[in-house]
Amino acid sequence: NQWRRLEEFLEAAFSRVGLNWRDAVRVDPALGRPAEVTRLQGDYGKAERLLGWRPTTSFAELVQMMVDADVASVRDSQATCTR
């Protein structure tokens, strides 16, 4: 279920900064993806077969890295604006 996966992402991202995503996100069904898009998912299988590569970062770790980078970017831009 795509919505469940989105909720997992939102939960991980917002909890990283101590917030509840349900307080900040409003769902508008009119803005959802078209019905013909049934599955969007990455698969590292080809990279594993051809290159022997396997991911070393979990989903939760990846979300934390993304949020931390965004937080750092906002802090940097705020520091620049106050100079």
Image (cartoon, rainbow, N blue to C red):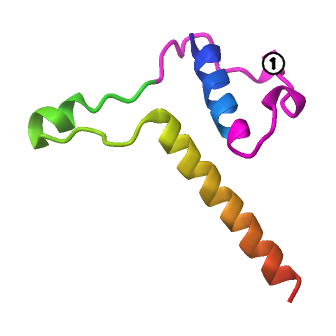
Q: Residue at x 86, y 89 (%)?
A: 83
Residue 1 left/right relative to 33: left
Query: Above or below — where is 23 with respect to 35?
Result: below
Q: Position of residue 13 (x, y in %)?
A: 66, 39
Image quarter where the N terminus lies is top right
Q: Which residue is mark 1?
A: 30
Which SS does the magenta portion mostly show? loop
Q: Position of residue 7 (x, y in %)?
A: 67, 22
Extreme-front residue of the structure: 18
Residue 77 left/right relative to 23: left
Judged from the image, the secondary structure of the residue bearing numbered disc 1 is helix
Badge 1 local density, few (<14 within 10 Å), some, or many (20+)?
A: few
Q: Which residues are magenta?
A: 14-40
Q: Position of residue 24 (x, y in %)?
A: 87, 34
Tell me, yes or no, whether the highlighted magenta stretch contains residue 69.
no
Q: Position of residue 3 (x, y in %)?
A: 65, 16
Query: Above or below — where is 19 with respect to 38?
Result: below
